[in-house]
C-alpha cells in the first residue's frame, strides 16, 4: 500500500524492520529494492539487489530487476549479463526478455535486440512495452514503415500511453509525414500535458510545416515545464531567427548557452544572430 502511494521513506522503514526480523523474507527484500529504484536511489537499489542475490541466488526476479537498475544506470553490458542470468533461471519471463532487448538496443546493437523483443511478445502478447520497443528497434535499423504497425499494436493495448504516441510521432517525422507526426504528438500531450519532449518534437514538425508562431508557442510550453532545457532554448532561438526576430533569438541563444556553456555550435549560432543585428 505504501509503495502504491509512493510513500517510499515509510515503505523502506517497514521493509527494513521486516528484514531485521527475518533475513529470509524474500518479498521484503524484493519490495525494498523496488522502493529504492522507484525513488531513484539507484545505487542503493543496486546494493540492495546485491544483498538479495546472496540470499536468493536462484530467484530469477532478483537478477532481472538488478538488470533493470543497471540499465537505468546506463550500464547496458552489465544489465545484459544479469538478464541472461535471470533467463537461465526462467526462460519464460517476458519482462526479462524485454529488458534484455532494451539493454542490447541501448548498447548500440538494434538488430540483435529485435529477437529479444520477439521473445517477449511470444511470452506475453499483451505487453505494450515489448511492441513499442520492437517498433523503435526497427526504426533504429532504418525499417521505418515496418515500425509503425508495432507502435499501433502498443497503442491498441495501452491507448493512454504518451510515450507510445511520441515514439510513433518520431518515426512519422523521420518519414517526412509531418502532419501525421503532429497528430501523434498532440495525442501524447492530450494524455500528459507535462511531457516536455513531446512539446519539443511538436515544435520541430510545426517549424517544418512553416507554422513558426505555433512552434514558438510549443517551445514556450516546454520551457514553462523545464526552464533549464538547453535544447528547447536552442530550438526557440533558431525559430525566432527564421522569423526575423533577432533580438529575441539572441536572448534565447544566450539562455541555451547558460545551460550548455561553451558549446561551439551555439557560439557559432550566436555570432550569426549578432551579424543580423549588426553587432558582429
Image (cartoon, grey):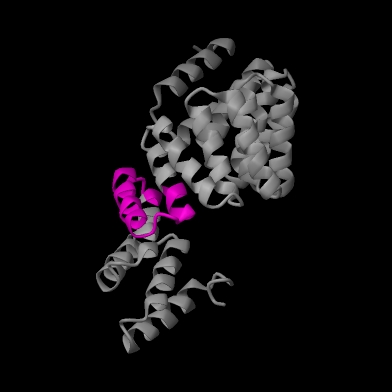
Residue 6, percent from left and from top:
55, 69
Q: Is residue 229 magenta?
A: no
Q: Looking at the picture, does residue 59 appear above or below residue 208?
A: below
Residue 84, percent from left and from top:
32, 50
Question: What secondary structure characterizes most of the magenta part?
Answer: helix
Instruction: Report the front residue among 190 and 24.
Output: 24
Q: Looking at the picture, does residue 58 appear above or below residue 119?
A: below
Q: Is residue 171 visible?
A: yes
In the visual, does 238 lie left or right of 44? right
Residue 141, percent from left and from top:
47, 25
Instruction: Report the front residue among 253 and 63.
Output: 63
Q: Looking at the picture, does residue 273 appear above or below residue 100?
A: above
Q: Is residue 236 visible?
A: no
In the visual, does 177 lie left or right of 8? right
Q: Looking at the picture, does residue 9 appear above or below residue 116?
A: below
Residue at figure coordinates x 34%, y 89% from the top left: 21
Residue at figure coordinates x 53%, y 47% from the top left: 122
- Residues rendered magenta in the picture: 71-99
Q: Splitting the image into 4 quarters, where does residue 252 fall?
A: top right
Residue 24, percent from left and from top:
32, 81
Amino acid at each position: 500500500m505504501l509503495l502504491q502511494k509512493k510513500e517510499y521513506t515509510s515503505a523502506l522503514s517497514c521493509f527494513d524492520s521486516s528484514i531485521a526480523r527475518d533475513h529470509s523474507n524474500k518479498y521484503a527484500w524484493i519490495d525494498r529494492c523496488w522502493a529504492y529504484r522507484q525513488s531513484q536511489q539507484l545505487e542503493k537499489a543496486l546494493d540492495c539487489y546485491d544483498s538479495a542475490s546472496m540470499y536468493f541466488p536462484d530467484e530469477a526476479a532478483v537478477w532481472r530487476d538488478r538488470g533493470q537498475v543497471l540499465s537505468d544506470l546506463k550500464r547496458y553490458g552489465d544489465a545484459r549479463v544479469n538478464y541472461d542470468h535471470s533467463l537461465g533461471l526462467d526462460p519464460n519471463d517476458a519482462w526479462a526478455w524485454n529488458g534484455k532487448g532494451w539493454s542490447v538496443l541501448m548498447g548500440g546493437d538494434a538488430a540483435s535486440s529485435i529477437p529479444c523483443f520477439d521473445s517477449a511478445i511470444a511470452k506475453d502478447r499483451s505487453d505494450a512495452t515489448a511492441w513499442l520497443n520492437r517498433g523503435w528497434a526497427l526504426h533504429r535499423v532504418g525499417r521505418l514503415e515496418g515500425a509503425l504497425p508495432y507502435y499501433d499494436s502498443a497503442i491498441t493495448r495501452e491507448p493512454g500511453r504518451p510515450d507510445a504516441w511520441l515514439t510513433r510521432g518520431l518515426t512519422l517525422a523521420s518519414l517526412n509525414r509531418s502532419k501525421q507526426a503532429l497528430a501523434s504528438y498532440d495525442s501524447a500531450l492530450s494524455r500528459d500535458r507535462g511531457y516536455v519532449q513531446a512539446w519539443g518534437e511538436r515544435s520541430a514538425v510545426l517549424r517544418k510545416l512553416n507554422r513558426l508562431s505555433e512552434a514558438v508557442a510549443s517551445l514556450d510550453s516546454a520551457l514553462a515545464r523545464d526552464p533549464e532545457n538547453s535544447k528547447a532554448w536552442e530550438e526557440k532561438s533558431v525559430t525566432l531567427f527564421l522569423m526575423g526576430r533577432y533580438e529575441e533569438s539572441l536572448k534565447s541563444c544566450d539562455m541555451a548557452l547558460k545551460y550548455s556553456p561553451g558549446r561551439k555550435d551555439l557560439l557559432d549560432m550566436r555570432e550569426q544572430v549578432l551579424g543580423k543585428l549588426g553587432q558582429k
